[in-house]
Amino acid sequence: MRAVAGLVLALLAVLLPAGQAPSAADEPAPSSRDLTLDLRDAYLDASPDASPGGDARSARGRTSARPSDPADGSGEFFWDPAAPRGQVCGAAACVHYVTTTSDAPPLASSDGVTPDWVRRSLDVTELALARMAELGYPGVPSDAGRGGSPHFDVYLADISRAGLYGYCAPEAPVPGASGQASSYCVFDDDFTGFPKPADDSLRVTAAHELFHAVQFGMDVHEDRWFLESTATWMEEQVADDVDDNRQYLSAGQLGRRHVPLDHSAADLGLYGNWIFFQFLAQRYGVDAVRQVWELAATGPGRRNDFSVKAVRRFVESRGGSFPSVYASFVHANLTPQHGYDEGRAYRRPAVDDSVRLGPARRSWREERIAVPHLTGHAISLRPKSGLRGRVRLRLSVTTTRSSGAAATARVFLESGKVVTLPIRLRRGHGDRVVKFSDRRVRRVVVVLANASTRYDCRQRTHFACQGTPLDEAQRFGLTASLLRAHR
């Protein structure tokens, strides 16, 4: 499968012209951090047996090239065949390296045998895999000894010159398990030139890329946003203190609530949306993400749902309504200091509309609020001074279609208490009356959410199941009116 083997070279030609290397002062672009899913897509395109309904009878010859593979050493990510090689193995993995050329890791060795950095790379790899097993995920599938042993293989190479921390490549179908693939990973040989200290970069790279290897063993076809968002979430479970994934939050729905959660075009949103899975983990427990993955996984007895459908089915299995839960996620993003364990460190986003109501302005109305699928719209309503007594605010919501629509009001009291009140939508309309005295209420925030999970799948789009969302043109209306005020 030379088309897959050579994809690294083709993509590198785009990322970095031949012979050009970033200077130490250059910060590698986060968007070039992960080559993994491009290699996954090439694997699927080049391997008929990897397609749904295929088998693994012709897996031989469909494997992507490892750094140790080429006979002539040509190519950006391939070792010089003349370079001496070494490896060190643990219980689950082997780390492979060379001792000369730019691909060689730091060679200082405390025991005079194995370079300390190689040993550290192995320890971090084994710890990451052990943590994933502790969380209940399956081990990575066997590669049938292709790396020289039954262990999972990690190769060290000088890939930072292309702005890459690491990548993981599916290489062969798992015999008898359609849709599952074995894989290997490549980590940078020293992580120099990146913003974080080398050991921190190693730890988050291992967490992220090794979880891709686990994912490929569960369902190599899964949606790109789901693969990347959950892999970035896994960094939080394996290397929580590094917090490298915070740099992507502004690109995800914490910062851009109007970009659909499942959008997977070439930007950083699919990394930043790890916060959605953190929300699920905090609401339902850390096992929630694994349970979603089990619903999405392929294999005998598995449901093999696509990503968004698996999330919806999980929420429903826990007695919840997905539109209501998604609206709660939008609310959590508006006040991350309250919504997330580490939320005080997250930047608080602005609302979409901010309105003050009082004696001179007793109502506000907007009839055409466009909310694309898997996005939300937030309106903040504040009482002006002078609203005394039993002041009430009526909230009237309308929708163009009921599928996936949700509306929720949160009342922020002067006492610091927050009250969440759903606005039940029946036949495209719902009303709710809330307190609005300026002595008791700081603000009322209304979230209008389009949590539709209906798609026409396999249309080659950038959304879940490569589908066209069927409720993309959702329109909401909101009228907020003061009912009575005593001075």
Image (cartoon, grey):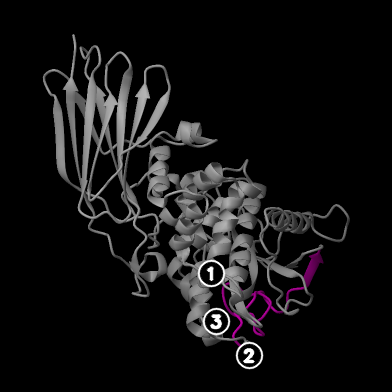
Q: The residue under label 2 is which amino acid type?
A: Arg
- Residue type at mark 3? Ala
What residue is at 40 percent from the left and 47 percent from the top?
A: 326
Q: In front: mark 1 or mark 2?
A: 1
Q: Residues within 10 Å of mark 2 (few under 14, many from 20)?
A: few
- The residue segment tinted magenta is 61-89
Look at mark 2 in the image and give the residue it sits on: 57
Any mark on residue 303, and which?
Answer: 1
Image quadrant in which you'd find residue 141: bottom right
Q: Is residue 195 above or below residue 86?
A: above
Percent from the top left, x then y, of residue 255?
37, 43
Residue 424 percent coordinates (x, y): 30, 42
As shown in the figure, which amino acid type bears the numbered disc 1?
Answer: Arg
Mark 1 packing: few (<14 Cα in 10 Å), some, or many (20+)? few
* Residue 384 quadrant: top left
Residue matched to label 3: 50
Quadrant including the N terminus:
bottom right
Side of 84 relative to 56 (left or right): right
Name the dominant secondary structure of the magenta segment.
loop
